[in-house]
Amino acid sequence: MKHLILALFLSVLSTAAAAAPVRIKDLVEFDGVRGNDLVGYGLVVGLNGTGDGIRNAPFTEEIMSNILERLGVNVTGEQFRPRNVAAVFVTAELPPFARAGSQIDVTVSAIGDASSLLGGTLVMTPLNAADGQIYAVSQGTVIAGGAAAEGDAATVVQGVPTAGVIPSGARVEREIEFDFQGLETVRLALRTPDFTTAGLIEAAINNTLNRRVARMLDPGTVVVDIGATRAASPAHAIGRIENIAIEPQRRARVVVDQRSGTIVLGEDVRISRVAVSQGNLTLRIEEDPLVIQPNPFSPGNTVVVPRTQADIQEEPGIGLAEIPDGTSLSEVIAGLNALGVSPRDMIDILKSIKAAGALHAEFIVR
């Protein structure tokens, strides 16, 4: 029941938030203002015997040899058997307009059979983008998000000790060339495409700037003519546009999580006139076998006589109840909650109402 109370509380908060104005910058992505994914392959050293086994991860030995040779150590023909190193993938996101010398966070994940990255240090690792160019270099102490303990006959693992992060662990070495000042138009891509919301964004921009500079192309795109804004630069124009507030429109939607019994609903969910009746049947079967043994020193065999008790009980449920036309789903759930209906029974009721065509919303079950 606590999940249901939490869901209703979040529903109230989402209803209040839907009625409040939202800035355009929180609803759209500006064309060209985007991050880029980076990836690298490196080595974590300094582990306390929790690194890769060289036999199971031969690539660890290869990259370790390459690093030592770059540092002037000749390891030709040598064999390594350390347990304090681990091969890892290093991933990061290069934010838009990142300049050379700025620092970004990185994520480190083991790819071999290392059991933990706790206490390890990532050796200098170049990070490449999709074009194969190096845009950042990462190095630093790994902060793992778990813990592991091992004994002779048992192992305890909490969280994921084979993955961690390095805050500000990479330094940007190359900038992505993008002529933002030369843009004549900027497209605003809605994160949730909607005809009404796109129209509201177009009208709000035109009304704020007192001229027609924005035009809706489709439910997911609004294009802005930078030259018509009479701003000093595209940056000044976007800085003014992104803080304009509107009241976005969203589709009515109900999201149900069957595993946790959580129900999250939108403000505009409505139910048509429908009657609901619900009850539970409980089938109980108990096995109580009886063992019969012969008398002492008498011929005979021990016999097991099966004894089974079967019972069907019908638990009290909801009698036939009528829901008036136009009732909101939050009112229905509040009523079911007052009757003591469990969250899982409530999910079944909502499914049946949706199947009857009386629930007017997108119904998502996870």
Image (tube, rainbow, N blue to C red):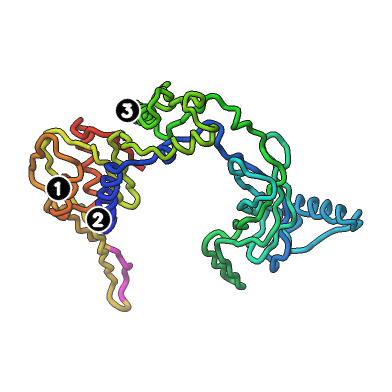
158 to 357, vertically: above or below:
below
- What is the CA distance from the residue labelled 2 to the residue labelled 3? 32 Å
Task: Report the magenta residues as a range.
Answer: 298-304
In percent of width and height, residue 234 lies at: 54, 32
The three-letter amino acid code for the residue at tag 2 is Ile
Establish if 117 lies above or below 197. Answer: below
Residue 52: in sight, yes or no? no
Q: How busy is the neighbourhood of tag 3: few (under 14 within 10 Å), some, or many (20 plus)?
A: few
- Horizontal arrangement in the rendering, residue 77 relative to residue 22 (left or right): right
For marks 2 and 1 on the same chain, the one whose residue lies earlier in the sequence: 2
Disc 3 designates what residue?
196
Q: For the point 22% across and 32% down, which residue is it?
A: 360
Circles 1 and 3: CB atoms closer than 8 Å:
no
Residue 279 tag number? 1
In the structure shown, which secondary structural element does the residue marked by tag 2 occupy? helix
Residue under the image location 77 percent in, 51 percent down: 58
Q: Residue at x 60, y 57 (%)?
A: 167
Please provide percent x and percent y for residue 290.
25, 66
Q: Which residue is mark 2?
A: 5
Q: Quadrant of residue 246?
A: top left
In the picture, the quarter occupied by the C terminus is: top left
Q: Earlier in the sequence, mark 1 or mark 3?
A: 3
Q: Earlier in the sequence, mark 2 or mark 3?
A: 2
Q: Position of residue 352 (x, y in %)?
A: 21, 37
Q: Could you tell me which quadrant the N terminus lies in?
A: bottom left
